[in-house]
Amino acid sequence: MMSTNSRRKRCDIPANIMIGFLGAGRMAQAMARGLISGGVVQPSKIWASDPDPTVLKFIQCLGVNTTSKNEEVVKNTQVVVIAVKPNVVSSLLKEVSPFITKDNLVVSIAAGIRISVIEELLPHASRVIRVMPNTPALVQAGAAVLAPGSAILKGDNDLVAELLSSVGICEEGTEANLDAVTGVSGSGPAYAFAAIEALSDGGVKMGLPRALSTKLAAQTLLGAAKMVLETGKHPGQLKDEVCSPGGTTIHAMHTLEKAGFRSALIDAVEAATKHSQFLGKLG
């Protein structure tokens, strides 16, 4: 898998690029907010559609263009992001297919839906890139992997990678990677939130105020993650460096091992990966 941050030649994001979201749910909101707050794309350059007026209200507060008509998004944007639930991707693509042209780059963030399925539902030689992002894009800390379709043009990968890199990191891989990517980073923020909540609960149990306990837990996970990324050391080595002989941490690690902590996380990744594969078969 190639890092699009370190090995890819950077490209400039065109100032006039128009980005559209078909579906304005949480992931679309996170990406749009991240792009806007990072100064990458102006709100006026973003369109979003959704049949639910309540959902549109959440993204309208960003100052983006909103509509209930999917075709309007396609007609007004170059990069069209499929941001709906997997079970409605097929019907959505059939609806917008008559309006997709060679000028549209279609980016799917729908879990499990294969590129071949998307290409079959769109006009011949449509430009398609499949991406698995995650919600920390909201705070410019996202993790994404992209996989190109069969008809992309030179520069398409770079453009999408640049957009995603502006709200976190982006790696380029193959479509075969994406189900596992879903299990690790796509669903991963939920595992981390659960860990923060549990650490906070532990602190409260032992007498810490809730606000302080949660802040310490969140900062600790943030700091640990930065150490992995910035030192290049194996997580196991960094763990060992915290575990002093006979100290508090090694006793805590023994308790985690007895509870099956690492095994549970491995199982979680496997479960999410398999469900992504299941969704792909439905598509």
Image (tube, helix red, strand yellow):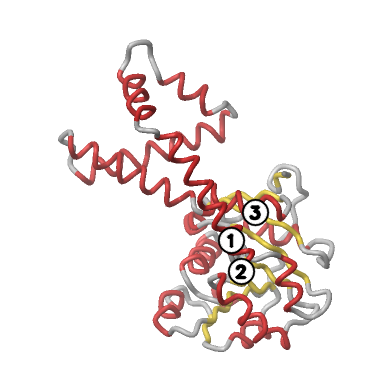
Inspect the image, locate mark 2, and give the three-letter code of the amino acid beneath it. Answer: Leu
* Direction from residue 224 to residue 69 in the image, left or right: right
Task: Please say if the residues under marks 3 and 2 sit with CB atoms less than 8 Å apart.
Answer: no
On the image, the x and y values in percent for residue 93 come to: 66, 80
**Toward which corner of the image does residue 151 lie, by quadrant?**
bottom right
Q: CA distance from mark 2 to mark 1?
A: 6 Å
Q: Which residue is mark 1?
A: 278
**Quarter the N terminus occupies:** top right
Q: Which residue is mark 2?
A: 282
**Quarter the C terminus occupies:** bottom right
Inspect the image, locate mark 1, and give the three-letter code of the amino acid beneath it. Answer: Phe
How busy is the neighbourhood of tag 1: few (under 14 within 10 Å), some, or many (20 plus)? some
On the image, the x and y values in percent for residue 158 come to: 75, 57
Circle 1 sits in a helix, a strand or a loop, which is it?
A: helix
Q: Nearer the viewer, residue 120 or 215?
A: 120
Looking at the image, is 96 positioned above or below residue 205? below
Instruction: Single out the residue that lies furthest toward the left.
Output: 207
Circle 3 sits in a helix, a strand or a loop, which is it?
A: helix
Q: Nearer the viewer, mark 3 or mark 1?
A: 1
Q: CA distance from mark 3 to mark 1?
A: 13 Å
How busy is the neighbourhood of tag 3: few (under 14 within 10 Å), some, or many (20 plus)? many
State the mark number for residue 178: 3
Q: Earlier in the sequence, mark 3 or mark 1?
A: 3
